[in-house]
Amino acid sequence: MPTRLERIKNSKEKQNDEFYTIYDDIANELPNYKEYFKGKRILCPCDWDESFEEQIVYSDGTEVFSNDLFNDSNFVKDININETKKSFEKKIDLIKCNFIKFLVSHAEDYEIKSISVSGYDPINQKGIRFQDIDYSKYDVVITNPPFSQFREFIDLMFKNDMKFLIIGPQDAPLYKYCFDYFHNNKIWLGYHFHMTGFILSDGTLLPKNDNRVRSCCWFTNLDVKYRHDELILTEKYSDKYIHYDNFNGIDINETKNIPYDYEGYMGVPVTFLQKYNPEQFEIIGLGSGDSAKKIGIERNYRGRTDLAYTDGDGKHHCPFGRIIIKNKKVYKDED
């Protein structure tokens, strides 16, 4: 009978983490951070890419021919961004990693200091795991990490004091381990909340309407403009707002419905983070789990520490994935 650790290992191996980012999504998001790439050493810890073994690679301007490029467990490939455009165009189609394609193509315009890439093949154990990289050699990490290891990846970024721009599950802010980073304003959403597609390892394109695509978005700790824009609120508080049964607060089903004159606690969906300005709103806690207990949410009709309310027909409801917030800038109508 397999041990507990073996069962966990087998479970992770069965998970499909091979979701390659399409070029259009990268081209739509990365230009927003152009100023933060200037003079920076960028690392892309990508999925395993056998094309890196087949092509001529450059490190510090020296040509290296190798069929065992990733056999050195400490190896990270440095891409020579000073090579001629003609030389790069000859081999760019060999590279599967669209992050590298975009960054090298824009390196001169963005004034990027260096671009490096790593990869790891868990089947053949080739390459270098992202856990084993010396991050002190880099300034910014840009990648689409394996979702089954998203928690470990995020923790590693903060442990190494890295700036990052990554793709992850959109409900990550609702995870206990990740919420604290949002609560303390250490991480936030990027500019595009949904991806437009993913490519599987067999070349299959997952379209925008696929749940696996719609459930992912960008996360970063690079500054974004919306965090400094005050959200314009147009709704006035009234009896139409539903109060929770087990917490002193109201339920907000859409960000646009946040009232401008309500001073109390509000439960909002995770999509609120697309408009979150820490100068305008305060994040209090989560609407379920241990965080809910800490802020006074009591057990509901199901005996769980989740937000709940009763509608006009007497039916009980537990809204999904609420973040508890408070408006710092309440505006009262003049008499």
Image (cartoon, grey):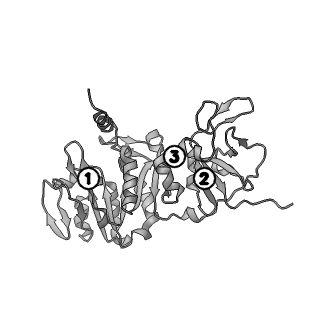
Identify the mark nearer the N-term, 3 or 2: 3
In this view of the protein, which residue sits in the foreground, 285 or 222? 285
Task: Say which residue appears at 63% left-offset and 50% top-offset.
Answer: 255
- Find the distance from the CA under tag 3 to the CA under tag 2: 13 Å
Q: Is residue 314 above or below residue 63?
A: above
Q: Quadrant of the C terminus?
A: bottom right
Please tell me whether mark 2 or mark 1 is closer to you in this view: 2
Q: Quadrant of the N terminus?
A: top left
Please tell me whether mark 3 or mark 2 is closer to you in this view: 2
Identify the mark nearer the N-term, 2 or 1: 1
Element type at marker 1? Answer: loop
Is residue 234 shown left or right of residue 92?
A: right
- Residue type at mark 2? Ile
Which residue is tagged 1? 119
In this view of the protein, which residue sits in the foreground, 66 or 189? 189
Residue 163 x %, y %: 40, 63
Mark seen at residue 234:
none
Residue 319 x %, y %: 61, 38
Which residue is tagged 2? 284
How crowded is the residue under tag 3: few (<14 C-alpha within 10 Å), some, or many (20+)?
many
Among the 4 quarters of the image, the one containing residue 292: top right
Residue 121 x %, y %: 23, 46
Is residue 237 shown left or right of residue 101?
A: right
- Find the distance from the CA under tag 1 to the CA under tag 3: 29 Å
How crowded is the residue under tag 1: few (<14 C-alpha within 10 Å), some, or many (20+)?
many
- Find the distance from the CA under tag 2 to the CA under tag 1: 39 Å
Which residue is tagged 3? 174
- Residue type at mark 3? Leu
Element type at marker 3? Answer: helix
Q: Are marks 2 and 1 in contact (CB under 8 Å)?
A: no
Element type at marker 2? Answer: strand
